[in-house]
Image (cartoon, rainbow, N blue to C red):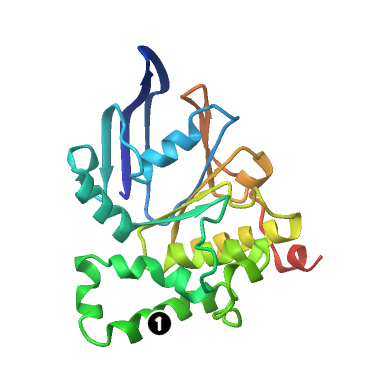
Amino acid sequence: MLIEINNLKKKFESEGVVTNVLHGLSFNIEHGEFLSIIGPSGSGKSTLMHILGLLDRATSGHYGFEGREVTTLDDNELATLRNEKIGFVFQAFNLLTRTSVLDNVKLPLTYAGPELKSKLANNKKDWINRRAKEVLESVGLGHRLDYYTNQISGGEKQRVAIARALVNKPSIIFADEPTGNLDSKSGVQIMKILQDLNDAGNTIVLVTHELYTSEHAKRIIKIVDGHIVEDRPVLNRRFASEVEVLK
């Protein structure tokens, strides 16, 4: 089991006002799954992703990650686990400006933890460059290595973000509205890359408010007002095909 969630709750307090956002969620995520978390604005899906991605803490409940209890970890331990095990793809790309595509993807490797120490011990710079080039080529951007991020299209920026998420070989990738800032053709290209990554064994969690986009996954969890109202397999799954991309 990759992730085990049991009775997870989250509340925010501001000036004495308590807002309950997540109300006792329970579910598991297996290695190799492609899961969509869907819900309207304000449903709690982004809050849940931030907790699952170790960017925020739950107020109470159990969160197990590869058998490790996350809720007992301190901030440094969370940061190490997040860098080594989790990749993120955000709607706004979150790339460094006036920085090359290659250097954006190399960035997570500069914070490598114990699992990468042996690989980085010798020829650190060469290994980092090779690994970054490898993942950029895997998303079709081998010809854009030295371009600055302000010189490439929105769809290419999102592919850079995917490559950056992959570079540490994480256990799971969280994609938060990854097609939200893209035209329909670029959006299909991104969904095809995510489906191909999942077919290659990567675990993907897609957060979206669009039912159409969510149906590219294999399983959907729907959240409304901080409650899970549906958890089901996708029976009529959508496939982002080369034909769609070329239209």
Q: Which residue sits at x=43%, y=66%?
A: 166
Rendered residue at 69%/54% (across/down): 182
The answer to whether 140 is drawn above or below residue 112 in the figure is below
Residue 141 shown left or right of residue 17 in the figure: right
Query: Which amino acid type corresponds to the residue marked 1 in the rendered image?
Result: Asn
Judge from the rendering whether residue 239 lies leftward or rightward of residue 217; answer left or right: right
Please give the name of the residue rendered at 31% of the width and 53% of the height, measured from the top-left corner. Answer: 82
Q: Position of residue 2 (x, y in %)?
A: 32, 50
Residue ID for mark 1:
129
Position of residue 38 measured from the top left corner of the image (x, y, whole percent)? 56, 36
Closest to the observer, 104 or 61:
104
Corner quadrant of residue 149 = bottom right
Specify few, some or many for label 1: CA neighbours under 10 Å numbering under 14, 14-19, or 20 or more.
some
Question: Which element carries disc 1, helix, strand or loop?
Answer: helix
Q: Is residue 199 visible?
A: no
Residue 203's quadrant in the figure? Answer: bottom left
Above or below — where is 68 with respect to 119?
above
Q: Quadrant of the C terminus?
A: bottom right
Residue 234 % position (x, y): 58, 44
